[in-house]
Image (spheres, rainbow, N blue to C red):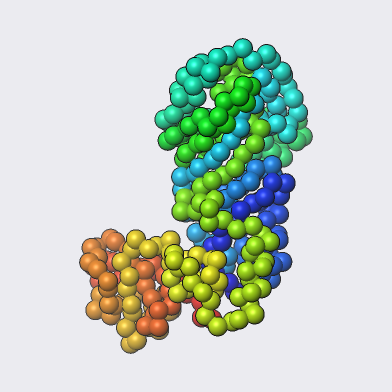
Amino acid sequence: MINGVINIRKEKGMTSFGVVACLRKIFGQKKIGHTGTLDPDAEGVLPVCFGRATHLVNMLSEGTKGYQAVILLGMTTDTQDAGGKILSTREVCVSEDEVREVVNSFVGQQKQLPPMYSAIKMNGKKLVDLARRGIEVERRERDVTFYEIKILEMKLPRISISVTCSHGTYIRTLCNDIGETLGCGGCMESLIRTRSGDFSLEDALTLSEIRRLKELEDEDRGEPVRSEFDQSNAPYSFMRSIDFFYRDHVRGTICREALQKALSGCGFSAGMVELSGEVSRGECIRLYTPEGKFIGIYKKKEDGFHLVSYFYEDR
C-alpha cells in the first residue's frame, strides 16, 4: 500500500470525488481520501491522502486557506455561484470606493451562514442533496475568519479578489454577502484555491502530470529522486511522506533491542530511544527504526513514551 500525500491541482469541471476516483485507477489503490472539497467549477489545490496518510485528513483540512475569486455583482443564484439558477438581477449602481469599503469590512472574524448547496451534513444528510430536492433547512451561523481580502482588479460589475481565510469558510457565501451589503446582490463567477495549509498552487500537479511522473519512476524502481521537502519515507518524489507533517516534533530513533516493542505499538522507557533534542513530559516525538523508517508519534510520560498514532508499514 502506498502511504503519503499528493498536492493535486484540481481542474475545472471535475468533482473532488472524481479526482480521487482517477487516482485510484492510476495507483491501483482504494484507500485514498481528499482534504477539503472543491466545487466542480472551482480549480486549484486539493491535497489527497494515500493509505495510512488518510488518518491525516482532518488535521490537513484545518489549515489556513487561500483563494482567488471573481465576484459578479448584480446577480444572485440559488447556489451563490454563476452556475446556479438565477434568483434575481439588479442594476449595479455602486462606486469603486463603496466596493472597497464594503470588501474591507469583511476582514476579521465574521459570522457566516453555510449555503444549502454544500457538503455539510445535518441529521446524516448532505445539505446539497436536500437543496436539490427543493428542501431548505435551518442552518446555524459559523465563526469564520478572513485574515486578508485584497482587491486585485475592479471592472464593475466584476471584482477580482484574493482571500486568506480559516478552514470552513465558503467563498461563494462571501461573494453573495458582499453583493447584498452593496445592495445589488452578487455571486461568485470563478474560484481558484491557491493554498491549503502547507500546500500551494505553485507545487500542485494535475492528474495527467501525476500519471506521467508515476510511469517514469515505476520504470526505474531504484530510490526515487527526492524533492527538497521529503524525508526518506515517501514512495514517489512527488508525494510528501507522513512524517513531513510532524517535522516540528523532535526525532527519535528506537534502539534495536526495543524495536519489536515499538512495532507492536507498545510503550518503552526513555533510555531506549535516541533523541535529536530535548523533550518535556506531555510532548510528542516522531519515532523511527534504526534504518530510518517512520513508525509513528509517541508522547512522553513519567514512565517513558506511549503510542499516539501508528503509521509503520513494512515494504
Q: Is residue 17 visible?
A: yes
Which one is in front, 233 or 308? 233
* Quadrant, the N terminus: bottom right
Q: Position of residue 306 (x, y in %)?
A: 34, 69
Q: With 312 as the anchor, is 220 left or right in this view?
A: right
Q: Position of residue 109 (x, y in %)?
A: 42, 30
Residue for point 61% across, 29% down: 71
Q: Position of residue 299 (x, y in %)?
A: 32, 65
Check the image and report above or below for 108 versus 191. above
Which one is in front, 200 or 280? 200
Residue for point 69% across, 38% down: 128
* Quadrant, the C terminus: bottom right
Residue for point 37% across, 83% down: 290
Q: Position of residue 11 (x, y in %)?
A: 67, 50
Determine which quarter of the picture holds residue 74.
Answer: top right
All told, the count of numbered labels is: 0
Check the image and report above or below for 14 versus 164. below
Which one is in front, 203 or 197? 203
Q: Is residue 310 visible?
A: no
Determine which quarter of the picture holds residue 75.
Answer: top right
Seen as rendered, the residue at the extreme bottom is 257
Check the image and report above or below for 255 versus 49. below
Determine which quarter of the picture holds residue 157.
Answer: top right
Residue for point 27% across, 77% down: 274
